[in-house]
Amino acid sequence: MNRLKNQRVYLAGAMDRVADRGTGWRDSITPFLDNLGVVVFNPISKPTDVGLEDNDTHQIKTKLKQMGRYDELTAMMKTIRAVDLRLVDISDFLVVNLDLDHYACGTYEEISLANRQKKPIIIHMAQGKNHTPDWLFGMIPHQMIFSNWDEIKHYLEHINTSENIDTHKRWYFFNAKNN
């Protein structure tokens, strides 16, 4: 059984005010997801030519702020936001890195959108599950909130291969047959 093969995941987490711009954890989890056959949507390296958030874009945004050119920054961010939210739309599930030491403005909107769509949202809580913001316990099944990456990998392997899984009314798999 390989339930996660060809499923699409969006990697949500802070980028603006993170020293490595959020690349470290994304680069670390991606090979594991690739091995499961999951299609990875990484907002740092988007599968499009618009709404990019690479190092050049980050430097441009920083300069626009410094120069007070907020109209240009707004236009740039509207495109980035639209592309990121579209990637959430077409994803089957999310893997989210939350660290209370870093502000994650867009991440909370991405979580909210995916939650409204009742998608599985797997959260890595850097400070540990017991430090998860209370509001999230009202949104996401607590069984999908984890304190470390190994727990997340074990959980995804279980979802991928176990005969019986608790879907938490989030995981739905379809048998598509070509006629």
Image: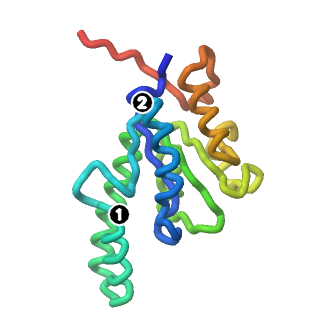
Q: Which image quadrant for residue 101? A: bottom right
Left or right, 42 with reference to 47? right
Residue occupying the far bottom of the picture: 67
Secondary element type, mark 1: loop
Question: For the C terminus, which image quadrant?
Answer: top left
Residues packed near mark 1 inside 10 Å, few (<14), some (14 to 19) or many (20 plus)? some
Q: Residue at x 73, y 52 (%)?
A: 128
The Cα atoms of the two marked residues, 2 and 1, are separated by 25 Å
Q: Amino acid at mark 1?
A: Glu
Residue corresponding to mark 2: 37
Q: Residue at x 62, y 30 (%)?
A: 168
Residue 111 visible here: yes
Q: Residue at x 34, y 64 (%)?
A: 54
Residue 18 or residue 176, whichever sits in front: 18
Secondary element type, mark 2: loop
Residue occupying the far right of the picture: 130
In the rendered image, residue 69, in percent from the top left (x then y), is placed at 30, 85
